[in-house]
Image (spheres, rainbow, N blue to C red):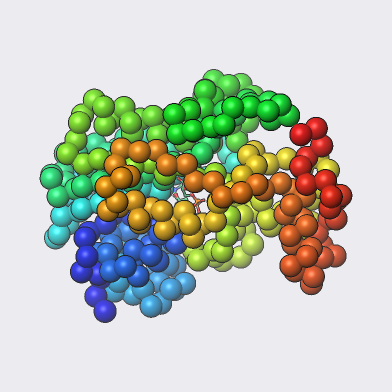
Amino acid sequence: MPNGQGPHVLLTGANGFVASHILWILIDRGYNVTATVRSQEKAEDIIKTHPDWLGKVEFAIVADFTSAKPFDHLFDDSKTPFNYVIHTASPVTFSVKDIQKEIIEPAEMGTTAILIAAENHCGAALKRFVLLGSAVSVLDSFEDISKPGKPYTEKNWNPVTAKQAIEHKDNVLGYNVSKTRAERAAWNFMKEKSPTFDLVVINPDIITGPMTHPISGPKSINETNQFAIANFIDGTHKEIEGVRFPFYHFVDVRDVARSHVDALENSAAANQRILLISGLITPQLVANYLRKNFPELRSRVPEGNPAQLLPPGW
Ligand SMILES: NC(=O)c1ccc[n+]([C@@H]2O[C@H](COP(=O)([O-])OP(=O)(O)OC[C@H]3O[C@@H](n4cnc5c(N)ncnc54)[C@H](OP(=O)(O)O)[C@@H]3O)[C@@H](O)[C@H]2O)c1
């Protein structure tokens, strides 16, 4: 079966953990999909992982997404105009040497570059730009979670700055800055340029769940499944006490992916930020869950104190 006959969607970072689920749904629903990856090899890995997707997705190689140029060409050279963009590509890593260059700049410049190219080259055919943001641009990185606080809403913004992340040498803070600045850049762009398309930002908390992206071994487990799940099985955590997460709520990757595809054509989503949060996740909850549901792994998962679900001091 050829690439879908439905509206034409550009999906960036298609080999990623979340984007692979989005791609799956786009193909299932008959969208005509062009998907960007950073190399031909990464496109081939997707097809090796999902041979039945051959011919159902067109790949475009964008090695450097921090300049608008590759997207200018991509939009200009396309046989059919693009109707939607889903932008997911952004660094998700907590092990870098240079927070500014390796996390913050690519996130912010990548988002701005594709928005500029879309405005200049897509014309009125482009209806909507859906940005995979993050709850970290809503939640306050410095909140004292041992005290009751006010509920968050989509009106909140994380006050964290690049200076704080760099001074603290804290890569998680750096990631939070990257997502906040990328999202702010997108809303500022909309305000300044008033393009013909609208913007939807989806802001999920920690995303966990099954992996459908190309995996070559334990090292290619995505960052959040690694710290929230795999680290409890692979010997990283010898005990639960002292284990901390950057945030304490999660959402399933399949719900996140469905939300992005639903957001393409739902008029209520226009110009909204949409927080996605499913439930609480704490180190003890993860240990309890693994030990109960995967008895064969029990000897590898630290027991902790099964009744103490929240970290001490909460
Ligand atoms: N996982 C979560 O808990 C979570 C929560 C909220 C929001 N998000 C957001 O969801 C999106 C996808 O995250 P994920 O968990 O699926 O991560 P992932 O599996 O690491 O996927 C990240 C994707 O972005 C691409 N990318 C990273 N740095 C890049 C750069 N400098 N230039 C071009 N492409 C780059 C990666 O390409 P390569 O494979 O070539 O490196 C990959 O395709 C990100 O925007 C992330 O901030 C994730």
In depth, the one of 298 and 148 nearer the eye is 148
In depth, the one of 195 and 71 nearer the eye is 195
Residue 31 lies, in percent from the top left, at 27, 64
In depth, the one of 133 and 95 nearer the eye is 133
Query: Which of the image's four quarters has the C terminus?
Result: top right
Q: Residue at 51% x, 39% y: name it.
A: 135
Residue 220 lies, in percent from the top left, at 58, 59
Question: Looking at the image, can residue 226 be seen?
Answer: yes
* In this picture, residue 252 sits left or right of residue 274: right
Question: Looking at the image, can residue 174 be seen?
Answer: no
Q: Residue at 25% x, 70% y: name it.
A: 3
Residue 210 versus residue 224 in the image, above or below: below
Q: Residue at 72% x, 54% y: name it.
A: 286
* Residue 235 placement: quadrant: bottom right
Residue 117 versus residue 83 in the image, above or below: above
* In this picture, residue 121 sits left or right of residue 167: left
Query: Which of the image's four quarters has the N terminus?
Result: bottom left
Q: Residue at 15% x, 55% y: name it.
A: 81
* Residue 139 placement: quadrant: top right
Counting every numbered tag in the picture gives 0
Residue 257 lies, in percent from the top left, at 43, 57
